[in-house]
Image (spheres, rainbow, N blue to C red):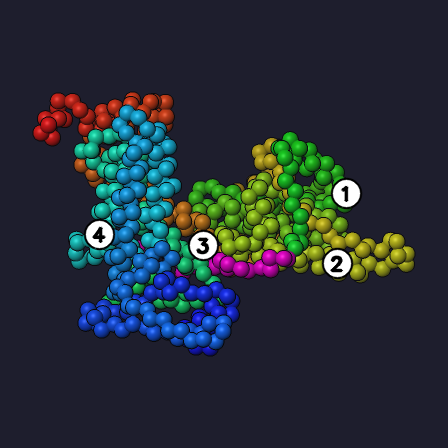
Amino acid sequence: MMEREGGVLDWSRSHHSPLKNNKLGLVDFTMSSEKRKGSHPLVLEAKDSNGRTSTVTIQPTNSCKLLGVVIDQSLRWNKHQELMHTRAVKWTSLFLRIHRAFHGLPIRSGRQLFNSVAIPRITYAADIWYTPLYTKPDSACRMGSVAITKKLQAIQRRAAIGITGAIRTTAGDTLDAHLNMLPIKETLRLTCQKAVARLASLPATHPLSKFVKRASRGLLQRHNAPLHCIFHSIDSKVDDLETITPASRNPNATNPFTISIEESRMLAKEVDNNSNGNNEQVVAYTDGSGMEGMIGAGAVLYRDGVRIRSARFLLGEDTEHMVHKGELVGIALGVQLAKMERIIIPRIKISLDNQAAIQGMENVSAKAGQHIIHKIHRAIDELRNNQKRRQELVEASDDETRINRSTQITLTWVPGHEGIEGNEAADKEAKKAITDGSSTAATLPPWTKDTLPQNISALRQELKLAARKSAHDKWKSSAQYDRTRPIDKTMPSNKYLQITDELTRAEAAALIQLRTGHIGLNKHLNRINR
């Protein structure tokens, strides 16, 4: 791979990008300690631009770093865990310099700093080096990365003490509940589960696709890879997850529609009222709605200000779909209603009250709902082509009366709950889809006959809720729960943060000490032999 024709060394020479020998690493990956001792150096012969040959010797090492992850010979990730723990301890020491019991950053700011700086550093590449904790059915012993979890939990406890100004004897789970922070094991588990969702949404053409499918079948009896471990940590089904393609469209391609988002709600309402009086324009109002744990979409078509037809579609439960996805399906329903028109339409306007859905239609990037946006683009192209064929069939003796204009399609934002007739009608249709089900198949796009895949954003939201529930259940079983429940029944929540927003640093420190019972009074000092 290095010395062959067209290999790494040839590429380095032809692209005038010389390799740094000290950045090359040689690791003999093996579980056998005997084979590790027998590792031999690698000798490379490289030619420079003048044709002279030079010899480079790379000595074998026990580990090397690749993209910030330390890879050891046995692939147990112990080296990286040690490095990450060392960095976390160092960062926490620096973090505590700006947090003292009676002076320093406010509690909310300290929590935000920890979540935005420390947590990303700790969870970086956790889906590779971390195995979420679990217990076997026939054993109460915890399995997974138990040792590093305990070390990181101690670091988070130390940071929480600095953030709140609590005494060092305060229990870590109490501080996590006051700050509404997830325990570190739940944070790492959630990181791995999000990686599972991302991997499960890869297209079949991706190099990792076949390995992901193998890992999703379950754990092996021996030698489980990190993929097997993270897929074992998730309880939700990912087989029917939507596919997200990284590069699915020519970046230079133009959209077959334009968008219009006014600066204010009043101006948008005025523009909508003016457009209804235009006799040459067809307006389709669309909407998506969530109610009773279900997601629905609706669309209503108006011509010359008169309601012509409507359509509605029930997506499914809100654990598999999002309201944003319902908004996209509503746009698809509006396009389908416009395609049912048998007349020539110079201008078609699709109005909805969700700016995120409108702006998302412009950029078909790797994001949730990508497959629906693709379908909408194709449907709009078909609509424009149908209108073009109808225009070509118009026969006129005078060239001036011949229609040569292409149909203009505009996605427009209208303010919701402002009494706009079309928007209110579309909202009723979306809610009606939840209560009465979808409309007839003749008014729906053909692809709605198949079950819609699960939305990756809905899966991530479900995973977050499950992590919160697990942390809450763990807190209820804590020895500190009975003591703090009479003080605050809502924990873990943001209520304590809201209270301390109005307090000084010294007052907030005294409050946390009083709430936890760990305070410099005689009763507590006697309990800790001080």
| Magenta stretch, main secondary structure class | loop
Label annotation for residue 279: 1
Q: Is residue 177 visible in the rendered structure shown here?
A: no
The residue located at (21%, 30%) in the rendering is 167
Q: Which residue is mark 4?
A: 146
Q: Which residue is mark 2?
A: 388
Q: Which residue is mark 3?
A: 454
Residue 428: name its quadrant: top right
N-term-proximal mark, 1 vs 3: 1
- Label 2 residue SS: helix
Residue 23: name its quadrant: bottom left
As measured in the structure, the alpha-carbon distance from the residue carrying label 4 to the one carrying label 3 is: 33 Å
Q: Amino acid at mark 2?
A: Lys
Front one among 196 and 150? 150
N-term-proximal mark, 3 vs 2: 2
Front one among 172 and 11? 11
Q: Amino acid at mark 4?
A: Val
Quarter of the image that includes the C terminus: top left
Residue 117: name its quadrant: top left
N-term-proximal mark, 2 vs 4: 4
Image spot of residue 338 (x, y percent) = 67, 51
- Label 1 residue SS: loop
N-term-proximal mark, 4 vs 3: 4
The local crowd at label 2, few if under 14, some if 14 to 19, many if 20 or more residues have their Cα within 10 Å, is some
- Label 4 residue SS: helix
The residue located at (20%, 53%) in the rendering is 142
- Label 3 residue SS: loop
As measured in the structure, the alpha-carbon distance from the residue carrying label 1 to the one carrying label 2 is: 20 Å
Give the side of residue 204 with respect to residue 362, left or right: left
As measured in the structure, the alpha-carbon distance from the residue carrying label 1 to the one carrying label 3 is: 41 Å
Residue furthest to the right in view is 398
